Image (cartoon, helix red, strand yellow):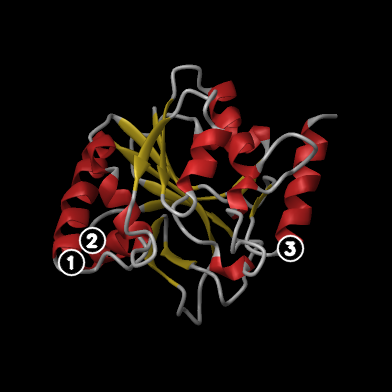
Amino acid sequence: MTYIVLVAGQGKNLQPLTLSHPKTLYKLDGKTTVLQRLVRSIRKHDKEAEIVVVVGFMYKHIQKELEDDNVTFVHNPFYSVTSSMGSLWFAKAYLQRENVAIINGDIVVSDKLMNDVICAHTDVPYVLLDSKCTEGNKYNVQVQGEKVCVMSKNLTEFIGNYASVTKLDAVSSRFVLEQLNQMVNEGMYNLFFEDALVQMIFDKNFELYYMDIKDYQWTEVDNVDDLLKARQIQAESKK
């Protein structure tokens, strides 16, 4: 499987902590960073993984951190004026694969979630959501039946927070690539890449499914409290 890990952003929600230090390089213990844990967990549960890391902000620090982890780097030189839409576009060649997982690089997940879900083969496109997490200022997901009907930061009604992972099969990954090219060419590179999925749902009746991971341990590292939770997940994985 191919894993596209997006880490080009500046981590503005954690500023000033991230002004001179990418948040994905924060330590979970004495020697393991957020990003190292993610990459090494993927490799642990998928020995044949193709891991692509899209870098931008302070990219040399990230490349140095992962220099021994057998990953492919893609550079987004316009990280300061693009969002994940632009970052994924720079890695578009890797969307032409049989199975693709697109992962925001600032997440820490349990080994069980990685093994059961993220590294599992899929025959349909789906996103991960957590119905236990219902913060209104996050990127949230509303569903109808077994399918996603909309995702946005501006929803008043939703089932849960988007959990930073999108899984694509061979057919849907090519549809996403086509939509990505269209929206970037129209100047929409400063949007979230997930907005391309929503546009496909509305314009092309794209069938996007979801998996609720409420019973798994995970966190996005978006504030100091998240970092403490991430360190707890790391500590428990060593028991």
Cβ atoms under marks 1 and 3 closer than 8 Å: no
Q: Amino acid at mark 2?
A: Met
Q: Is residue 116 visible?
A: no
Q: Identity of the amino acid at label 3?
A: Val
Q: Identify the secondary structure beneath mark 3.
A: helix
What residue would you read off at disc 3?
A: 224
Residue 142 x, y percent position in the rendering: 45, 68
Q: Judge left or right: residue 227 versus residue 1.
A: right
Residues marked 2 and 1 touching at CB (< 8 Å) = yes
State the quadrant of the N terminus.
top left
SS at mark 1?
A: helix
Distance Cα–Cα, label 2 vs label 1: 5 Å
* Residue at position x 76%, y 63% in the image: 225
Residue at 37% in and 63% down = 83
Label 2 Cα crowd, 10 Å radius (few <14 / some 14-19 / many 20+): some
Residue 57, given in percent of the width and then of the height, sits at 46, 54
Q: Which quadrant of the figure contains the C terminus?
A: top right
- Residue marked by disc 1: 203
Quarter location, residue 124: top left
The answer to whether residue 18 is left or right of residue 225 is left
Which dot, 3 or 2, sits closer to the camera? 3
Q: Nearer the viewer, mark 1 or mark 3?
A: 3
Circle 2 SS class: helix
Count residues near mark 1 (Cα–Cα under 10 Å), then give few for <14, some for 14-19, many for 20+: few
In the rendered view, does 157 fall on the left or right side of 98?
right
Q: Which residue is mark 2?
A: 200
Compared with 37, 180 (above or below) is below
Residue sitting at 28 percent across and 35 percent down? 94
What's the CA distance linking mark 1 and mark 3? 39 Å
